[in-house]
Amino acid sequence: MQTRRKTLKQSAVLAGLLASTGLFPQYALAYNKGAFEAKSVAEVLKALGAGAPVESKDVVIGGPDIAENGAVVPLTASTALPGVKHMLMLVEKNPAALIALFNVTDSVEANFATRAKMGQSSDVYAVAVMADGKVLFAKKEVKVTLGGCGG
Amino acid sequence: MADPMRIRAQAAGDKATVRVLMSHEMESGQRKDAAGKLVPAWFIQDVEAKHNGKSVLIAEWGPAVSKNPFLQFTVKGAKAGDKIAVTWKDNKGETRTDEATVS
């Protein structure tokens, strides 16, 4: 059972991670430099102008419980909910939290898989930004035995 | 010029699952070389997928996506014979487009 306090705390953490992703403004107009430079989940969300995140069972994050090689961690993010605008993948303890941002259109399902680098064991987040402004997330802990950032 | 992408698109019912394997270094900008200097970041920033010429997915990536990135997504309404084109652009401005036919 999750207490409200715990939920709020997680929301704050995630909001911080998201806000930290507002980076690289010198590139293509569409590219969210701020979002990709953001250090925390909350910062990433802030950079994207997204509201407070709420944990949701309708968003699914997939990944290994233990990743032997942090350089290649397979992650999936999906939701069956309609009206998704963006799907994000975040790793809380990476130097920059945001891994990838997918702009969802009507022609694709909000179901993506890719591989990420992880510097250390951390919570990973899948965040769905809905067209109505709601921000839903799911998280999962991935233990990394060999880091993949720096060396 | 970068190596070609490997794209496989398989139709199942009224949608198609697309798997893309790109060939890219994806340097994070966190690593140091033998002389202790930071290796500058070099990674794919934008990925766009088109279904029969219509843009269906635009993704923005950070440097934390793995080397030689893998991407899987599902295109609704795609059937055998349709064209799926994928374009990426990295932070040095290099770009590459490859196309595959849904099978």
Image: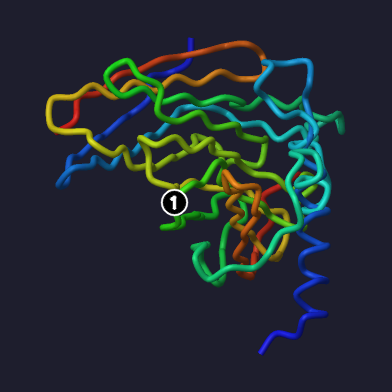
Q: Is residue B75 visible?
A: yes
Residue type at mark 1 is Pro
Front residue of A57/A118: it is A57
**In this figure, which residue is indicated by the disc labeled 1?**
A82
Q: Residues within 10 Å of mark 1 (few under 14, many from 20)?
A: few
Residue drawn at x 67%, y 50% as measured from the top left: A148
Instruction: Decide if residue B14 is on the left or right side of residue B71.
Output: left
Residue A129: give x, y in percent of width and height. 61, 48
Residue that lies at the very extreme toward the bottom in this rendered image: A1
In the depicted structure, whether residue A43 falls above or below residue A59: above
Q: Judge by depth and name the residue closer to the eye, B86 or A122.
A: B86
Q: Nearer the viewer, residue B44 or A130?
A: A130
Element type where label 1 sits in the image: loop
Residue occupying the point 75% across, 75% down: A7
Q: Which quadrant of the structure image shows residue A122?
A: bottom right
Dividing the image into 4 quarters, which one contains the C terminus of chain B? top left
Percent coordinates x, y for residue A55 in the rendering: 64, 68
Label 1 marks a residue whose chain is: A
Viewer can see residue A151: no
